[in-house]
Amino acid sequence: MTDRRQFAPAAERNREPILRVLKDWLPQQGTVLEVASGSGEHAIYFAPRLTPLLWQSSNYEQEQMDSVSDWIAHAPADNLLPPLWLDVTEAQWPVEEEAYEDKPVTAIFNANMIHISPWATTAGLMAGAGRILPAGGRLILYGPFKINGEHTANSNREFDGWLKARDAGYGVRDIRDVITEARKNGLQHLVARPMPANNFMHLFEKA
Ligand SMILES: C[S@@+](CC[C@H](N)C(=O)[O-])C[C@H]1O[C@@H](n2cnc3c(N)ncnc32)[C@H](O)[C@@H]1O
């Protein structure tokens, strides 16, 4: 059988520092929806280390769906659910369907998506989190961010240029703009944590 697993070296490097923060910030129970799971390496690493939470991965590109499925087959865990097809810009997400009522999403985790996609994905992510999360539910973001219009490192400035050359709508986001979008959807920014390689994690909570 063909092995469709993708390998993202950065995901292997950042998974342990991210896990440490997730352990501090995630609720004790419910389902964590991972938006844009990419290769699936984060999902298979985090899920067994975060029981009894359920881990719901998702993607919106077929090759990445296949990669996640093959990673899960390679490293199954009882609390790792099969990946869902999810485009955050859709007005309704699959976890809002009736069939999902017995697995309420109490947290959403999203790494490295909002800078490498148009702003509509940030808006879609915040709108979805606002609709889905219960009061006290949490949204956790990981990636590079600007602060007050400034890059936090030269490498991020260069990365931003590379992103914009690829698509003018892409770019390292200013956390101020992300917080504004979150507020519009009933999400409050609680805290930020600096991470290795000039990244940050940001915690939002539904009022
Ligand atoms: C750089 S990858 C990050 C993957 C993984 N989270 C990681 O940190 O390794 C960016 C991801 O954003 C996803 N993405 C882009 N636009 C999206 C959308 N509208 N809805 C859901 N995912 C989207 C892509 O499919 C891709 O998996």
Image (cartoon, rainbow, N blue to C red):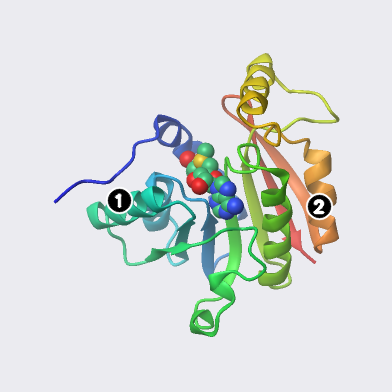
Residue 203, numbered circle: none
The residue type indicated by label 2 comes to Glu
Q: Is residue 199 above or below residue 30?
A: above
Residue at the image point whose x is 36% and y is 52% from the top: 68
Q: Residue furthest top?
A: 154
- Horizontal arrangement in the rendering, residue 184 relative to residue 52 (left or right): right
Q: Position of residue 174 (x, y in %)?
A: 78, 35
The residue type indicated by label 1 comes to Trp
Q: Kindly tell me whether residue 18 is visible in this rendering.
A: no
Which residue carries the number 2 mark? 181
Query: Is 46 in front, or is 158?
Result: 158
Whichever of labels 2 and 1 marks the residue nearer the N terminus, that label is 1
Q: Position of residue 192 (x, y in %)?
A: 72, 41
Q: Is residue 10 above or below residue 128?
A: above
Secondary structure of the residue carrying numbered label 2: helix
Q: Position of residue 8 (x, y in %)?
A: 40, 34
Query: Is 101 in front, or is 163?
Result: 163
- Horizontal arrangement in the rendering, residue 44 relative to residue 141 (left or right): left
Residue 71, numbered circle: 1
Q: Quadrant of the C terminus?
A: bottom right
Q: Kindly tell me whether residue 144 is visible in this rendering.
A: yes
Asked which quadrant contains residue 175, the reply is top right
Residue at the image point whose x is 67% and y is 68% from the top: 91
Dot 2 and dot 1 residues touching (CB under 8 Å): no
- Horizontal arrangement in the rendering, residue 83 relative to residue 126 (left or right): left
Secondary structure of the residue carrying numbered label 1: helix
Residue at the image point whose x is 60% and y is 62% from the top: 107
Q: Position of residue 75 (x, y in %)?
A: 26, 53
Mark 1 is surrounded, within 10 Å at the Cα level, by few (under 14), some (14 to 19) or many (20 or more) other residues, namely: many
Query: Is 163 in front, or is 7?
Result: 163
Residue at the image point whose x is 41% and y is 57% from the top: 47
